[in-house]
Amino acid sequence: MGYIVEMGELYLCGNYKRERLAFVKGSGTRLFTEDGEEYLDFTAGIAVCNLGHCHPALVKALKEQAEKLWHTSNLYYTEPQARLAKRLVDLTFGEKVFFANSGAEAVEAALKLARRYSFENFGEGKSQFIALENSFHGRTFGALSVTGQSRYWEGFKPLLEGVTFVPPNDLKALEKAFNEKVCALILEPIQGEGGIYPLTREFLEKAKELCHKYQALLIFDEIQTGIGRTGKLFAYEWFGIEPDILCTSKALANGLPLSAIVAKNEIMEALKPGTHASTFGGNPIACAVALKVLEMVSEKTFLEEVSLKGKVLKEKIEKIDPDKKFIKEVRGEGLLIGLEFYQSAQPIYKNLLKRKILVTQPKPNIIRLTPPLIINYREIDYFCNVLEEIIKG
């Protein structure tokens, strides 16, 4: 055990279940420990480093901006922030952008915006939310309150009132949950922390229809599915269904703290001066890097390659266990893939770690694969070969 791990265990809060690993360098799809060991990264910082570690183009953008301007607060305009807002508008359905620092903050902003919009247009009383069981939206009180997994609530109640949870893809339950008091429905097009469970087109269409009928806003949490992860810049593009509010973060600045919500003018106008803010939201360095991220990831050929890599990875994994003796299901889109095992996935996770491959385990029997989008086919082959050796002993 190196000195970094020792120091961390002494002084860092114990709220994370960390592996006894300390990384000191990253390059592309690889991470290097303080002892010089090399790991193949199939986590990308939990779907964050979509362009890998220390991409030269992003390092260049960061250095150039760091020598110009770091921070002014949002009392003034900065060029990187204004340009990034325009780029997000150009690439989505939106017309206005609000910047913050993390996914949870983006969700908080979306929830506040939904309530404020409803208050300004319909008065008090239209303030309830609908969310999905098995969802995850963050750790702050508002985001936690619309997270449909009770294991995250323990010790933090009472949470935000007025939230109804419905099972994902249950059309009847969704329709039953709606009434005139609902101000918004929040969902992930593919549930990430829940174990990589995609929502159906039929369910999303019904969600859009019901929101329109009850004059409620549809919020898509694309914090994990966004910025090219599924083979589209945002997952909603696969369905042709636009939300009213889009939340994005994680990969937006490839590891620098940055998040955003995107919406039409009519909705975003509800956030008048003084109603919401973020001191560091949209700082110039993070925005400069995000501009380069979007320039690279939004290329049609890049996104097509992500889809192809995801298809190849899924097919190779399915060929490992064609009779489904070990792997119950392979789910996901693009390079957001979940492997559900019949039994605990902990031995798989631990053996991959021993073979110096990093993955995540969002649930006891599920392994999540979110490699950098720049992963190559040789690395996909290597991962699948190692996984087959582990599964078949």
Image: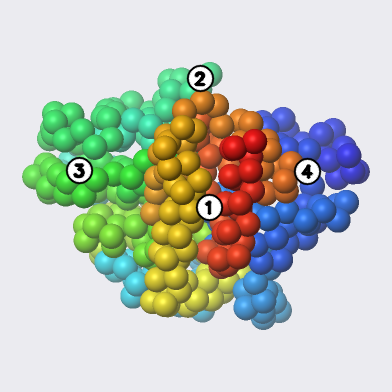
Foreground tag (4 vs 2)? 4
Q: How far apart are marks 2 and 1 (CA)?
A: 28 Å
Please, is residue 296 above or below residue 151 in the view?
Answer: below
The vertical placement of 98 against 145, above or below, is below
Query: Which residue shows up at 56% across the image and 66% down it?
Result: 377
The C terminus, quarter of image: top right
Q: What element carries label 1?
A: loop
Mark 4 touching mark 2, by CB under 8 A? Answer: no
Of 347 and 55, the residue lying toward us? 347
Mark 4: which secondary structure? loop
Residue 199 image point, x, y percent: 29, 44
User: Label 4 belongs to which residue?
Assistant: 21
Q: Which residue occupies 28% across, 35% down?
A: 168
Of the two numbered discs 2 and 1 on the same chain, state the one appearing first in sequence: 2
State the mark number for residue 370: 1
Residue 304 is left or right of residue 281, and the answer is left
Question: Is the C-beta separation of discs 4 and 3 under 8 Å?
Answer: no
